[in-house]
């Protein structure tokens, strides 16, 4: 483990005082754990991290008016920071994946038996990732589902005509259909036809849902890709790159 001979120092960040006190005292009774600092808010946690950094952080996500994700993001952005285990009342796969993406070393439910919690602490201190066995299948299912959705979106974008992609980018930029028609120098009927095609191809039921679908899968608005001539403008969506291949009109 990474802790020194004096034992591991932990920081417990949780705004539930009774829970934090009981867990803190129990951890102090464990061999190899020398200190358990406690913080009920992120500012206190930041102060402890700056002055007397621990070997590991046990972090609740739902603090009063604050999110533990903010501290995870801060830790990920700094070098030589202690690993963190999220200690949450939820086992929502989406939240677990987000925490891992932000650099969390593990995820524990607050109902985890104490012996399992201690084992997770040592495992993460040894440089390993810890997830409770009961969370592995839901997390993997979530990741696989997300991957399939992204692949489907990539296929959707790859199959669009250059003009359909321009229309989609205009919609993602927040333009109305009239503004799209003016931007691309086409008729409202043409825009309506392209939008209907986009809805059908993406299996969405409204322009708003279409924009959300496109944005969530990396499609940028036309205002985010510069004012290059359409024939030379790159379309970089989810790793796919193509060009319009036509001399479309563009905003001056």
Image: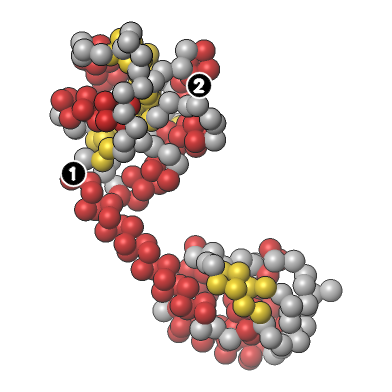
Query: Regarding mark 1 in the picture, which secondary structure is present there?
Result: helix
Q: Is residue 76 left or right of residue 117?
A: right
Give the answer, above or below, for where 79 lies relative to 172.
above
Q: How is the image coloured?
A: secondary structure
The residue sitting at 36% across, 68% down in the picture is 148
The residue sitting at 48% across, 68% down in the picture is 213
| Few, some or many residues within 10 Å of mark 1 (<14, 14–19, 20+) | few
Q: Residue 82: image x %, image y %?
A: 43, 26
Give the answer, above or below, for where 155 lies relative to 130.
below
Residue at the disc numbered 2: 46
User: Taking the image as drawn, is residue 36 in sight?
Assistant: no
The residue sitting at 49% across, 31% down in the picture is 75
* Residue 57 lies in quadrant: top left
Instruction: Out of 183 and 141, give the one closest to the viewer.
Output: 141
* Residue 200 lies in quadrant: bottom left
* Residue 6 lies in quadrant: top left
Q: For residue 133, which numbered disc appears in the image?
A: 1
Q: Is residue 192 left or right of residue 123?
A: right
């Amino acid at each position: 483990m990474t802790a020194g001979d004096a034992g591991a120092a932990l920081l417990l960040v949780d705004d539930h005082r009774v829970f934090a006190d009981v867990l803190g005292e129990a951890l102090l009774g464990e061999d190899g754990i020398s200190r358990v600092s406690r913080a009920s808010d992120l500012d206190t946690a930041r102060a402890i991290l700056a002055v007397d950094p621990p070997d590991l952080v046990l972090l609740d996500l739902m603090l009063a008016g604050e999110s533990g994700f903010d501290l995870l993001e801060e830790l990920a952005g700094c070098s030589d920071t202690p690993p963190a285990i999220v200690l949450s009342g939820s086992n929502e796969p989406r939240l677990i994946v987000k925490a891992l993406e932000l650099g969390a070393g593990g995820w524990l439910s607050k109902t985890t038996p104490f012996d399992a919690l201690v084992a997770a602490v040592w495992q993460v201190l040894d440089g390993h990732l810890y997830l409770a066995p009961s969370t592995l299948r839901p997390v993997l299912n979530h990741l696989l589902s997300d991957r399939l959705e992204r692949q489907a979106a990539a296929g959707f974008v790859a199959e669009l005509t250059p003009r359909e992609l321009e229309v989609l980018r205009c919609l993602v930029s927040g333009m109305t259909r009239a503004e799209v028609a003016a931007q691309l120098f086409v008729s409202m009927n043409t825009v309506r036809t392209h939008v209907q095609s986009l809805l059908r191809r993406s299996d969405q039921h409204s322009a708003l849902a279409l924009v959300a679908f496109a944005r969530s899968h990396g499609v940028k608005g036309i205002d985010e890709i510069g004012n290059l001539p359409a024939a030379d403008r790159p379309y970089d969506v989810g790793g796919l790159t193509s060009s319009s291949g036509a001399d479309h009109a563009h905003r001056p």
